[in-house]
Image: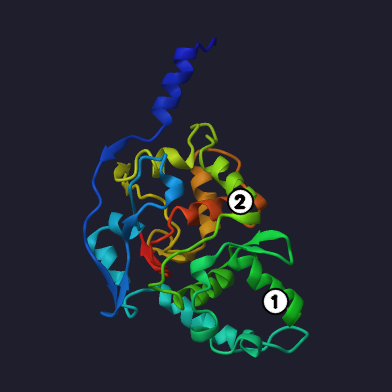
Amino acid sequence: MKRTAGTVLAAVLLAAPAFVAADPDDDTLVVNGEIEITTKTAAPAHMQDTGIETIMSGWHFREDETQALQMDDFDNTGMIFVERAQEVWDTPEGSAGKSCASCHDDPAESMRGVRAVYPKWDDDRQEVKTIAMQVNECRSERMGAEPYKYDSAPMAAMEALITVQSRGMPMNVAIDGPARETWEKGKEIYYTRYGQLQLACANCHEDNYGNMIRADHLSQGQTNGFPVYRLKNTKLNTVHGRFKGCIRDTRAETFAPGSPELVALELYVASRGNGLSVEGPSVRN
């Protein structure tokens, strides 16, 4: 059967998701009645050409019932994983007989502010490093323990423990200096169309945020809420796991979690949220 250009275009349009308008809400997020979370703020200067003037947390694009789960740690299922990670933090592991606490004591003090500035450039390694990369470096080089699989449940839980210590603090990821090259690579990936559906991150999260795609309310794709407990899969999800799922949904071969491509993408997307509060572990559909 001969396929014309018109036939191919029609097939793509039928396969592609339909977008239906649905604006985000104007609710206010306060956790445990005391931690004020900035969920809307002016877009960072590097986004001036995007047409987006206000950046918004994905929390604004969820139903009231889902939003409420994040407002109280007792209701936030993600906090269960924080408690489990605290036990791991205090437990010696590996050939060195050390725990995380052996070097870093109480995470409430030593990890405060860490999540707000990651990913970040590491002068010693001469690369941009994510929290997951740092965790595995500590495990393998200082504890003599096996590194976690990059987007595994233990890694997600440890990231949640580290993240919660910075909750309420503004994201402030550096994109200048030696990190700039990685940031530019991440930006390139963000705007590149992938897969049979020929979709880029920007097509959903810049051009169509606020719209409905099937049953999902598209957000701006901010990462300040990660790790995220998703009601859909009832587990704590890492940002690279979410990236992998998004790329898969375009019907493309995905990059591996922890790959240079997804590290670059994480840096770029995180920088789009500079000014929003760290709010993980968050709750989403």
Alpha-carbon neighbours of circle 2 within 10 Å: few (<14), some, or many (≥20)? some
Q: Nearer the viewer, residue 5 or 271?
A: 271
Query: What distance separates the C-alpha of mark 1 from that of mark 2?
Result: 28 Å
Q: Secondary structure at mark 1?
A: helix
Q: Nearer the viewer, mark 1 or mark 2?
A: 2
Q: Secondary structure at mark 2?
A: helix
For the N terminus, which image quadrant? Answer: top right
For the C terminus, which image quadrant? Answer: bottom left
Q: Which residue position is annotated with label 2?
A: 180
Q: Position of residue 274 (x, y in %)?
A: 44, 59
Q: State whether residue 280 is above or below residue 199.
A: below
Q: Position of residue 90 (x, y in %)?
A: 59, 89
Q: Which residue position is annotated with label 1?
A: 139
Q: Is residue 268 left or right of residue 121?
A: left
Q: Nearer the viewer, residue 97 or 16?
A: 97
Q: Position of residue 253 (x, y in %)?
A: 61, 41
